[in-house]
Structure formats: structure tokens, C-alpha cells
Amino acid sequence: MPDLNFEVVGASPERYAAEPRMLFTLRVTEVGNTRPDPTRFHSVALRCQIQIEPARRRYAPEEQQRLGDLFGTPERWGKTLRPLLWTHATVAIPPFVGSTTVDLPVACSYDFSLAATKYFDALEGGEIPLCLLFNGSIFYENSRGELQVAQVPWEKEAYFRLAAPTWKELMAHYYPNSAWLCLRKDVFDRLMAFKSQEGFPTWEQALEKLLIEAEETVAP
């Protein structure tokens, strides 16, 4: 059974797509082949689970404050700074012999109800430590030229440090000077009624009015 190694060698925003996507450049290499000739791979149906490993970097005081919603206060981080699931991705790797390089497209959500989005947005700079876990099906030829199928075991993984500004660059490209906020329907209805009652033409003006009133209430 063939053995494949996976390595992430780069990442960049995809500029033209229906949704924000990050393209991870993935190098796939056959290892441990004792046959005289390299294996001919017809295709690989690859699945990938991507996790964020927040304990593998340091955080500035401003970042620590913004991450309080996810991990609590810094003195608790020894217990709360655990891996976060970012997303799942798939890619069909075309025929190759020996090694190949493909782009793994990863959809990026701007929904602030998701832990991954909150984490990415909280970072000022530095790198995002990622762990990619692989699985899937390998279609290849054996020594007699017969088509065979094997599985990619879950212990196959790769580590990569994504530059935090790369994610922000992607979101700024698709949502310039904007952010998405998901509200419960009853809360949205109350906000809409307030906006209509006050005659505000935009949601920003309605929210700014509420924020000003809240700040005046708590001001000493």
C-alpha cells in the first residue's frame, strides 16, 4: 500500500471566487516506496480537518483582551487555551508520479458567532498556528497495472503557521470596511422597530445611537 506525505508550503487569498477562500499550497509526496518504479497515482480524494492551536503563540495585551470571549482572562489560559476547530476542506488531486503540488481551497466565514472568526479577528499580527489532519481515498496502480484503492490514515498531519494579516487581507477584499453580525430573530425585530421609529436610514446610525446612549448611561 502506498504511503503519502503532506506538507503545506504556502497560503494566499483567492481573489476571485463566490465566497472568501484561502488557498493552501499542498505538496504531496510518496514516501517509503521499496519498488523499483514509483507508484502511478490515478487520483486522491483528500479530506482535511483544520484546527487552530492557540497555545503555540504569544499574545499582546490588546489581543488578550479581545480573546477574553473565547478563553477568559489570561490567568485561566493554562486550562482554556485548547485547540479550536476551524473548518473542513476537500480537494481532488489529479494523476501524478512521485510528488505533486495542488491548491487546497478553504472557505473562510466572516460570521462572528464562530469561534474561529473571533480568534482571527482578535489578532493584530504574528502567525496563526494550524494543524491539518488528513484522510481520504488513494487510487493507484499496483505492480501489475491493476487499479487499487487505499485509505489515507488519520495520523497523517501537517503543521503550518498562517500569517494573521493574510486572513485580514482576504476579508478586507471581500467585505471592505464591513463586518457580519448574526442576531436572534426577536432581537433583530426589536432593532428594526427602533430603526424605523427613529427614522434612521442605515443600521449603523441606529446602532451608533444605542451605543451613545449606553455610554452616557455608564459614564461617571
Image (cartoon, helix red, strand yellow):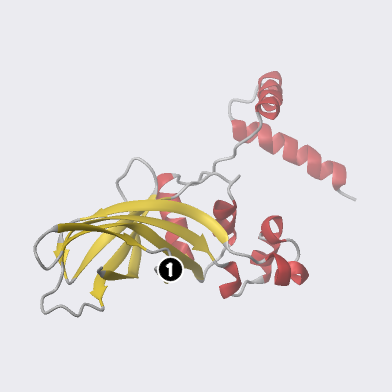
Residue farthest to the front?
144
Tell me the amino acid under the disc marked 1.
Glu
Q: Position of residue 51 (x, y in %)?
A: 50, 61
Q: Is residue 106 visible?
A: no
Q: Position of residue 69 (x, y in %)?
A: 70, 55
Q: Is residue 172 visible?
A: yes
| 190 over 119 or under it: above or below | above
Write the residue at 63% across / 65% down: 82
Residue under label 1: 155
Residue placed most toward the observer, 58 or 89: 89
Does residue 42 appear to the left or right of 136 in the view shown? left
Residue placed most toward the observer, 97 or 34: 34
Write the residue at 71% across / 59% down: 68
| 47 over 34 or under it: above or below | above
| Element on which disc 1 rests | loop
| 131 over 92 or under it: above or below | below
Write the residue at 17% across / 72% down: 98
Q: Position of residue 6 (x, y in %)?
A: 33, 69
Residue placed most toward the observer, 215 or 167: 167
Quadrant of the rendered image containing residue 71: bottom right
Residue farthest to the right?
220
Does residue 144 appear to the left or right of 187 in the view shown? left
Does residue 63 appear to the left or right of 134 in the view shown? right
Q: Position of residue 213 (x, y in %)?
A: 79, 38
Write the residue at 14% across / 73% down: 38
Crowding at mark 1 (Cα within 10 Å: few <14, some 14-19, many 20+): few
